[in-house]
Image (cartoon, helix red, strand yellow):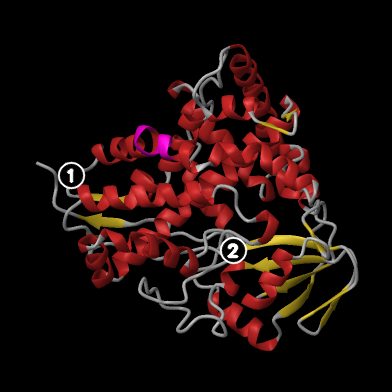
Amino acid sequence: MSGLGTTSDASYDPMRQFAELAGDMRDPYPMFAGIRADSPVLEVHFDPRPGSRMRLSSLFTVTSHELARQVLTDNVRFSSAGYEEMFGLVMGRTILQMDPPEHQRHRALVAGAFRARVLDQWGDTIIGATVGELIDAFSWDGRADLIPQLTFPFPVRVMARVLGLPEADWPRFLRLSTELIGIMRNWDRAVAAGQELRGYFAEIIADRRRNTRDDLVSQLIEAEVDGHRLSDDEIYPFLLLLLPAGAETTYRSSSNLLFGLLSQPEQLDAVRADRGLVPQAIEEALRWETPSLTVARTATQDVELGGVRIPAGGFVTVSLGAANRDPERYLLPDAFDIFRADGQHVSFGDGAHKCLGMHLARLEMRILLNAVLDRLPGLRLDPGAEDPHIHGLLFRSPPNLPVLFDPAV
């Protein structure tokens, strides 16, 4: 196979790309609280910029937990088909924009690749090995920035290994992945990245059809439900969707988890002493700082939601971040508290489109956190660092996370 080649732009900074995608806002939650108090469903009018591909003149933003779950679980009145216009030309037809029953058929074909048995196989050999390699590079130093040195490269390397990509292709794979995810900022670059990745995956798929391996691409090729198998044209979109759905959200959720614990040293100490607390720390981090704040739906008929009339064809955005901090649902919702009893959240969505990769995301977060606690004793925020914080309006994570720890000897 020819591979992806090497990057031609030495100045390319993938972390800057992710930072630009996030949106420029430090704390959107007071704004969300004000919107929710005024109306849990807010109609927003706007004028598309000249030359913009966005043809909408208004949208409806849902901020309450109860109404968010109503929208997410009602596939009849609220369709996911609107994602076709946003992502279809770049990724092809993915399960993201499919509604039942088409969605269930395709989801069933790819779901086998995320069974617990398969994930267990990836745990030590891929996820654990990747975390170990990244920590090896700085564990001797006593200080690190956990974002560029650990949480940012971690999920893309895992995804590349899960897909069975040669290590020589990883730098270019990272670049094309971030260009693809940046569709809202640079449409033409995203389209070009999608085409290049599609050509690359065509070679990978052809190779796996000839020589099956123990990787995700081979599993997708071999998947069969009721006599139907995935064609190449059905596999490409799923592989492209894995990049924003898997790499971006895992990077941000892992970063938010570490930031939350480091910002609350007593909770970090509790988790360090009792690893049985790791799962609830993960769930609280996902609730407290949702990595991707918004999902979209389109009303299929005239609907009244929260006392607001939404016309058929109306574009609805569900603010997962606002729903996860609804005081009607959570006690002291703005606090990071791994001991809270009401920690269920909608960060993975709900209903038919609930995130297919949520078990993999949790596994990655668990392995990463345990490795950090095992290998970086005395881990703490660097008191000399300049104002570490979580940032973003569309996506949320800390731009940097400078820490100190006892170096390995």
Magenta stretch? 120-125
Q: Residue 337, position in %: x, y? A: 37, 74
Mark carried by residue 167: none
Secondary structure predominantly adopted by residues drawn in magenta: helix
Viewer-nearest residue: 53 or 248: 248
- Reading the image, the residue beneath label 2 is 293
Q: Residue 331, position in %: x, y? A: 47, 84
Q: Amino acid at mark 2?
A: Leu
Please name the residue shown 65% across and 33% down the image: 193
Q: Counting other residues with Cα less than 10 Å from the Cα at mark 1, is it few (<14), some (14-19), or many (20 or more)?
A: some
Please name the residue shown 13% across and 52% down the image: 406
Q: Is residue 113 left or right of residue 390?
A: right
Q: Is residue 121 magenta?
A: yes
Q: Amino acid at mark 1?
A: Asp
Viewer-nearest residue: 257 or 235: 235
- Nearer-N-terminus badge (1/2): 1
Q: Nearer the viewer, mark 1 or mark 2?
A: 2
- Reading the image, the residue beneath label 1 is 141
Q: Is residue 233 left or right of residue 265?
A: right
Please name the residue shown 43% across and 24% down the image: 167
Q: Residue 269, position in %: x, y? A: 22, 66
